[in-house]
Image (cartoon, rainbow, N blue to C red):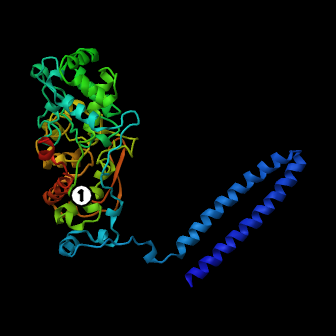
Amino acid sequence: MAMMTASSSLLAILAGVFVGALALVLVANEIGGRAGLPPPGRLLLAGGLGFGVFAFAIKAILIVEIGSMGRDDLAPTPRPRATAHATAADEAWPARARVSPFWSTWQALPATPPEPAGNRSTAAKIALGKRLFEDRDLSADRTVACASCHGLAGGGDDGRAVSLGVGNQAGGRNAPSVVDAAWLSRLFWDGRAGSLEEQAKGPLLNPVEMAMPSGEAVVARIAEKPGYEEMFAEAFGPGRAIDFDGVAKAIAAFERTLVSRDAPYDRFVSGEDGALGPAALRGMALFEEIGCRSCHIDPTFSAAGRDKPFGVYRPFPVFADDGLLARHRLDEERRAAWRVPSLRNVALTAPYMHNGAVESLEEAVRLMAVLQLGLKLSNDPALRMAVTPGPVEDGNRRSLTAGRRRALGDDDIADLVAFLESLTGWPAAALAAK
């Protein structure tokens, strides 16, 4: 019966549109004739008048169509649950998520990273890039390689607060992980590089990191070593001389192979319900509820993912807490804008923050909850009780997120950490052994 009613309404709307369009053509012809418009002008006038009618008709049809749907038509199709995990997952999952499974909007990391048209990957180019990535002779004192700060035995970084360059000079920033960097549209903490090719050149010439005086000096250092000339010819074609652009392209091609595989989160959103335990499931729901996902956007869990190329920077901190800022030496750079880092494999890449001053993932979560989301840390049930959704704002009236609670307790922090640990998919041991 509902379908017959909807069909009748649609036919009535279409008939009305036809009659209205015909009337507008006649009106436009009359007005155009009195104004002395030639036939093409009258046609344009009729089109302009008719645009609004057609726009209204489209909206009306959509309203009728949606209104004719039953509740079952609007509900998302439930995914089959693995019997062995159904009870635990259902008990852990919030009631609203069981009714309307919001995980269907979350994205898994694609199997293949993007690559630019001017640097297609080949086995020869990747092999060359791997050798360059691990070559300490490409630093001024022959002691530092790309792999020194981006170790493949861990999470793709060096585990230090700040990295050490030539002469054991301390850098100014915590080394970001190179794993899954192929999906990011901006590299470095300040986002100054727009591609892996551009990023690869930076450390080689940085006076603190590898301290080579120029790209030409890097090329000369490579040319003096046996085997490189043949590898360049195989990677880029016969007759291609070793050049700095080729160095960067080869390193970037190798870095695009450093991809997370089989993270529990990815398996879960791809259909394997048992991939996440109860704590991680609660943490996933909380991650969205309190606003973490508005900056750490899946599948990269960064605002600098290639499918989200705009708005990659966020001010930090947004909310002031002098005690926390001083404890972690963050009070010197208030309101600085940083590229939102990826949370992929974040459980492997301590310490945290741009200065590497936060030792544990639990403390990093507490810090972000207070300084970015304006939440309190408390186990008081009254403070943690859900509140009416609304904008959370600071003194500058900057709207941050639609908050549903005012505080996080210790168990909330543990659940968020469990979810973040589910983003670990880096097969470090297998790749480091290659």
Can residue 192 be seen from the camera position used here? no
Which residue does the image show at 25% across and 37% down from the upper left? Answer: 255
Q: Residue furthest bottom?
A: 1
The amino acid type of the residue labelled 1 equals: Tyr
Q: Residue at x 23, y 48 (%)?
A: 260
Dividing the picture into quadrants, the one containing residue 152 is top left
Mark 1 Cα shell of 10 Å, populated few (<14), some (14-19), many (≥20): many
Task: Give the left or right position of residue 395, taking residue 136 as reference.
Answer: right
Q: Position of residue 63 (x, y in %)?
A: 57, 68
Which is nearer the eye, 155 or 409?
155
Which residue corresponds to mark 1? 265
Which residue is located at x 22 percent, y 38 percent?
178
Q: Is residue 69 above or below residue 36?
A: below
- Residue 150 visible, this angle: yes
Residue 195's spot in the image, x, y percent?
34, 33
2 left or right, relative to 329 = right
As drawn, 160 above or below 424: above
> Going 45% across and 74% down the picture, which residue do you hit?
73
Foreground pick, 236 / 296? 236
Counting labels gives 1
Front-lying residue, 432 or 48: 432
